[in-house]
Image (tube, helix red, strand yellow):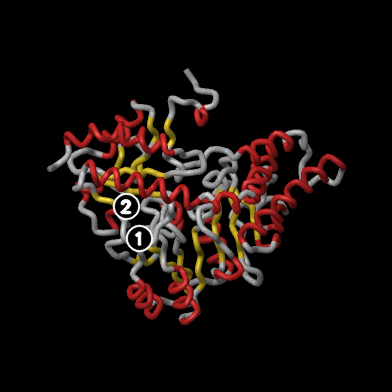
Amino acid sequence: MVLKAPMTESNLCYLDHNATTPLLPQAEAAVRESLAAFGNPSSVHATGRRARAMVEDARERLGSAVGASAAEIIFTSGGTEANDLALRGFAAAQGCKSLIVAGIEHASVLAAAAGATVIPCDARGAIDLSALEEALKSLPRPALIALMLANNETGVLQPIDAAIALARTYGAYIHCDAVQAFGKMPIDFSSLVVDSMSLSAHKMGGLKGIGALLVRRGCEVSPELVGGGQERRRRAGTENVTGIVSFGTAAGEVPRLLADTPRIRALRDQLESSLRRIAPQVNIYGETAARLPNTSCVALANVTSETQVMRLDLAGVAVSAGSACSSGKIAPSHVLLAMGIPPAEAKSAIRVSLGWTTKEADIARFIDAWQPLTLNAAA
């Protein structure tokens, strides 16, 4: 049976907010209203103008939420397209001769930067700044660095300010994937001084299928999608009005989301302390690093990620593993492998990610469902 409203059903404990978070009520209401604006936002008649007004209002709201001007925002189909446009279109327009990526980047960055120089990270999951500087010294210039703000699997915050300083020293550009960070920590594009930044709506309460690439004023971007003049000729295709409206509305709720982070952090800490009490041998990756307040990446030796995810799912608890291959079998996380975690250990990791719907009862339910799995764990 298909559940019509799974996020409000008492039989589902949803702890996979880093994959997608439930639609905020304010965004849902705005989506319903936007459905009446059926006109093409590029049309000049009244229905088209109404749709265009909704798009531009959402652009202004998103800009206000992240400290960007409306002219710096390009709407895309999501974070993956935004990263692709940065690594290809932005890099090409700036004449970049080298690409540098951190080994813990999202797969959409690594795939778009084929042949790039990959920078290792330390055991806590943060990029090795010394290795980054060596790469900047030796590679043809200008280079484009891709460094995420917060890791989607461990929640570990990257030393973006130090990376920006290195980029400026060596005349490099820097792209920041902020998809996982948006709505969970303050972001100000104007003061961060990166050259481009990717965002996605469904990680912070908007619809799936809509994202944005922010491109700093004065920088150019070569379109990957051509055939129309939309998005100031930087991304062709009729705008997803409903998705954009959801994004702008969710962005307007960012102050409320950020105000909720102390509560979420307390729940995350409660979860981890319970895990430690039940199974002292459990590994919590990035535990000593600065992290997002909602993310725990944990491994239980001798119990595979796949087993944990399936057993928890049968108990009505939704979590995820680090990554999944196309066949549907769970593979070791490339992030954990980049941190030096042995493959066998990485295959026992799951990600528990909290969000605005998470309650204390969800933590208790997760612990109750997870505890029996420890019987198969190593002593």
Q: Where the C terminus falls, by quadrant?
A: top left
Instruction: Give how far across and how far down residue 287 sits, in percent.
Output: 31, 56
Q: Amino acid at mark 1?
A: Gly
Q: Which residue is under mark 1?
A: 103
Q: Residue furthest right?
A: 45
Q: Which residue is under mark 2?
A: 334
Badge 1 marks a residue whose secondary structure is loop
Q: How many marks?
A: 2
Which callout, 1 or 2, points at the residue further toward the start of the chain? 1
Q: Amino acid at mark 2?
A: His
* Of the pair 260 and 337, the residue shown nearer to us: 260
Instruction: Give how far across and how far down residue 291 sits, in percent.
Output: 40, 58
**Residue 190 higher or lower than 88, as above or below:** below
Other residues around mark 2 within 10 Å, as few (<14) / some (14–19) / many (≥20): many
Residue 280 marker: none
Instruction: Give how far across and how far down residue 155 sits, in percent.
Output: 40, 54
* Of the pair 286 and 255, the residue shown nearer to us: 255
**Residue 127 higher or lower than 253, as above or below:** below
Position of 46 compared to 132: left or right?
right
**Residue 182 higher or lower than 363, as above or below:** below
Is residue 347 shown to the viewer in this render? no
Instruction: Give how far across and how far down residue 231 sits, in percent.
Output: 69, 55
Position of 197 compared to 243: left or right?
left
Q: Do residues under tags 1 and 2 come within 8 Å of each other at their CB atoms?
A: yes
Badge 2 marks a residue whose secondary structure is helix
Q: Residue furthest top?
A: 1
Looking at the rendering, which quadrant does residue 124 occupy? bottom left
**Residue 277 higher or lower than 9, as above or below:** below
